[in-house]
Image (cartoon, rainbow, N blue to C red):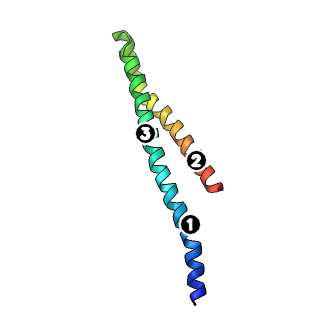
Amino acid sequence: MANFFAFLLASALPLARRVFVALGLSVVTYTGLSLILQQITDHIISSVGGLAAAGAQLAALFGFQQLVGIILAAITTKLAMTQLTAWSKS
């Protein structure tokens, strides 16, 4: 019975360590990516705000802000799926 517990402990510790490292890296990556995407969004929206009034109104009418959000969400999803695939292979 002692050998069984030693086996469980020996196999559980590396797995637990790997899970905690993956969670820690995920939090850091998500925080950094969120900050970068927010800055990109703010820059794009402020650039549109620099247009002439008619151009900015037309962009708002066509839903330019939603377009930017959808495109950046697609990029974020692609990055997350790539990272998940890479993590599951290792």
Of the image marks 3 and 1, the number of the one nearer the N terminus:
1
**Which residue was labeled with disc 3?**
34
Q: Residues within 10 Å of mark 3 (few under 14, many from 20)?
A: few
Residue topped by disc 2: 83
Label whose residue precedes the other's in the sequence (2 or 3): 3
Whether 28 is drawn above or below 63: the answer is: below
Residue type marked 1:
Leu
Provide residue 33's location: percent of width, then percent of height. Answer: 46, 39
Say which residue appears at 44% left-offset and 34% top-offset.
36
The N terminus sits in image quarter:
bottom right
State the image coordinates of residue 69 (x, y, percent, origin top left): 44, 32
**Mark 1 or 2, which is nearer the eye?**
1
Say which residue appears at 36% left-offset and 17% top-offset. Answer: 49
Which residue lies under the disc numbered 1?
15
Please name the amino acid that badge 3 sits on.
Ser
Give SS at disc 3.
helix
The residue closer to the viewer here, 49 or 64, is 49
In the image, which is nearer the foreground, mark 3 or mark 1?
A: 1
Question: Could you tell me residue 55's position as x and y percent?
Answer: 39, 12
Residue drawn at x 45%, y 40% is 32
Residue extending farthest to the bottom is: 1
